[in-house]
Image (cartoon, rainbow, N blue to C red):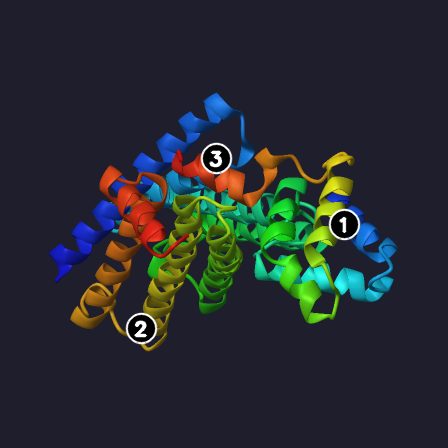
Amino acid sequence: MAESAAFEAACTCLEQSGSLDRLAARGTIRLALKQAGLEPKTVTVRQLDVVLTKLLPAELTSRGITAPQELCARISKALAAIDAGGPRSADTPEAIFARLGGS
Amino acid sequence: MQALAAGAIGLLVAASIAVGFRLVALHRRSGGAPELLLGLMLLLSVGVAYPVLIAADRVSTEMLRPLLVVSALATGLGFSMLYVFTWRVFRPQATWARLFAGAGVLAMAASAIWRCYTSVTRPDPSIASATVSESIVLTMTVMTAYGWTSWESLRYHGLMRRRVRLELADPETTNRFLLWGLMGVFVNVGILVNTIAMAQGIRVFQSPVILLASSTTGLAQTTLLVLAFLPPRFYSSWVRGRAASLGA
């Protein structure tokens, strides 16, 4: 199964900013997602937006990138333009377990 | 001690039937397959198979045969559904998970057909007359089903805990993964204790230690099942309050 459209778009945007090469860009976003308990295959635009705000700036700073907030804002803008794709929210384990318990 | 064990099994059966009916009713409203699979699994493998097996210990040979057939079919169908549930919920896109679930269903079906056949044809159809290899195949297949669902649920609980810290997940749903994962662990501990005891020739219904262990695991399963799928309001409030106090 391929990575989600949101993940691919964020990686492409980070790579095109010229700050990191393809491998480093994907690795950096993967690390931020791991910290958030999210997976590249299923991450949605909304979830990735939270990661861009709360976790990715620190990851970028640790790689010597200046002005990480501006870069994250640019990625966030790129994400807003794409179709979220990925599995329907009703099919995720999270949505199913929420239904099963009535919450 | 036997009364405690009987009470624990009775509670587990009652809780499984209550949760099973609730999930099947939920399926009628939502149309979701996971609620139907889990609901029928609980109704068949615990709600039907357990009481029928207990009754089978107390009836004549003529009555025993149909009861054992019903128990074998309920067990086979019920645990097959657990394999499919785990695949559909946690790994719907993974080919290996589809194959693994398919192998589990085939193993349960083969075991059920064989048990039906021997229940009808064997001169002494009682459970005690089952061969060691028959018991091992069934036990291992059931333990694998619970072990798999437990592993996936506890793994997902780990992911959800990190999401809760970022306010990306609901604390009560996160806790439900933990409860379901632990339920699978307690089922397997219960099966393991009884299997080891039987392999050593211990009469499990006569041994106070085994009865105590079975009662404990049975009560734990009941508690976890109810808290996961029929949570009382106070428990839901406690989970949410605890998450809030931890800064989630």
Callout in the foreground (3, 2): 3
Q: Secondary structure at mark 1?
A: helix
Front tag of 1 and 2: 1
Label 1 crowd bin: few (<14), some (14–19), many (20+), radius 10 Å: many
Q: Which mark is residue B197?
A: 2
Q: Circles 1 and 2: CB distance less than 8 Å?
A: no
Q: Residue A85 placed where, x, y %?
A: 73, 37
Q: Which mark is residue A42?
A: none
B83 lies left or right of B227 = right
Circle 2: residue type: Ala
Q: Is residue B64 visible?
A: no
Residue A62, quarter of the rendered image: bottom right
Measured in 3D between alpha carbons, the distance from the residue under mark 3 to the one under mark 2, in whole angstroms, is 35 Å
Circle 3 chain: B
Q: Secondary structure at mark 3?
A: helix
Identity, as a three-letter code, of the amino acid under mark 1: Ala
The numbered dot on residue A10 is: 1
Discs 3 and 2 share one subunit: yes
- Quarter of the image with the C terminus of chain A in it: top left
Q: Which residue is mark 3?
A: B35
Q: Quadrant of residue B1?
A: bottom left
Q: What residue do we see at 35% from left, 49% from top?
A: B244
Tell me which chain the residue with mark 2 is part of.
B
Question: Which numbered disc flags the more N-terminal residue, 3 or 2?
Answer: 3
